[in-house]
Image (spheres, rainbow, N blue to C red):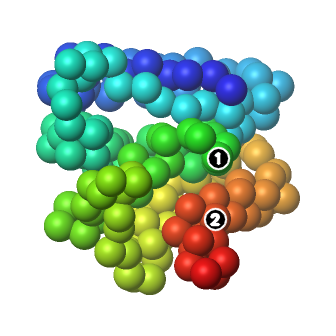
Amino acid sequence: MRLLVIPKEDIVSCNYSRIINHFNFLSRNSRILEEKCQSIDVSIFGYDKDPRELFEIPEVMKWFRKSIDHNIPWFYFLSTGEKDAGLLLLLYSTIDNKKIKKVTNGIFLLLERKDIMNFLMINYPILNTFMENNGLDIELNKKICKNITNKLEKQFFSESLQQ
C-alpha cells in the first residue's frame, strides 16, 4: 500500500493539482496503473496538533467533497483495506455532518441507505469514465465495485449483523 500525503496548504486552498498530477502520472503506464489499483491511502499532513478528528475539520471535508467535482477517480485508487481511511473520509464528506458523531469507541454514523447510494452514484460514473479513458477491463471495474461494497458493508453493517 502506498500513502499519498496531502498537505494542509492544498486543503486550505482547495488545490487539487498535486493529486491530479500524481494520478495522471500513474496513468501513463498501463502496468503501473494496474498495480496501483485500490492500493493508495491518504494522509492529511498539517493537522497533527489539532485535537479534532479529520471528519470534524470543515476544510478537510470540503476538500474531499469538492475533489469529487474534479472527477478524481478515488474509487480506482483508494485502498479498501481494513485500516485504510481514505474511502471513509470521502464518504463522510458527502454526508450531512449532523449524522456523524464522535463517541468513546470511535465514530457513530446515523447513515441511511440513501446516503450510501448517493455516495456510490456520485463516484461510480467517475470510475467508469476513468476506466474507459484508460482502456481498463470491465472485469476489473466489477472487482473494484465489489471491493468498495464489501468494505462499506463490513464497516457499517457487520457489527449490527453479529449482535
* SS for dot 2: helix
Residue 133 showing in the rendered view: no
Asked if 142 appears above or below 14 in the picture, the reply is below
Q: Residue at the spot x=40%, y=54% of the render?
A: 105
Q: Residue 103 is drawn in which quadrant? A: bottom left
Q: In the picture shown, does residue 119 fall above or below 28?
A: below
The answer to which of marks 2 and 1 sits earlier in the sequence is: 1
Relative to 133, residue 44 above or below: above
Determine the image quadrant of residue 161. Answer: bottom right
Question: Along the horizontal axis of the image, is 83 left or right of 71?
Answer: right
Judged left or right of residue 102, residue 24 is right
For label 1, the SS is loop
Locate residue 11, reporting x and y percent: 23, 28
Q: Residue at x 45, y 72 (%)?
A: 116
Quarter the C terminus occupies: bottom right
Q: Residues within 10 Å of mark 1 (few under 14, many from 20)?
A: few
Whether the residues at callouts 2 and 1 have beta carbons within 8 Å, the answer is: yes
Residue appearing at x 57%, y 39% in the figure: 84
How far from the left and from the top, in percent, is residue 25? 58, 18
Tell me the amino acid under the disc marked 2: Lys
Kind of residue at badge 1: Glu
Q: Which residue is mark 2?
A: 154
Question: Badge 1 is on which residue?
Answer: 82
Q: In the rendered image of this protein, does residue 121 appear above or below residue 65?
A: below
Q: Quadrant of the N terminus?
A: top right
- Disc sitting over residue 106 in the figure: none
- Mark 2, other Cα within 10 Å: few <14 / some 14–19 / many ≥20: some
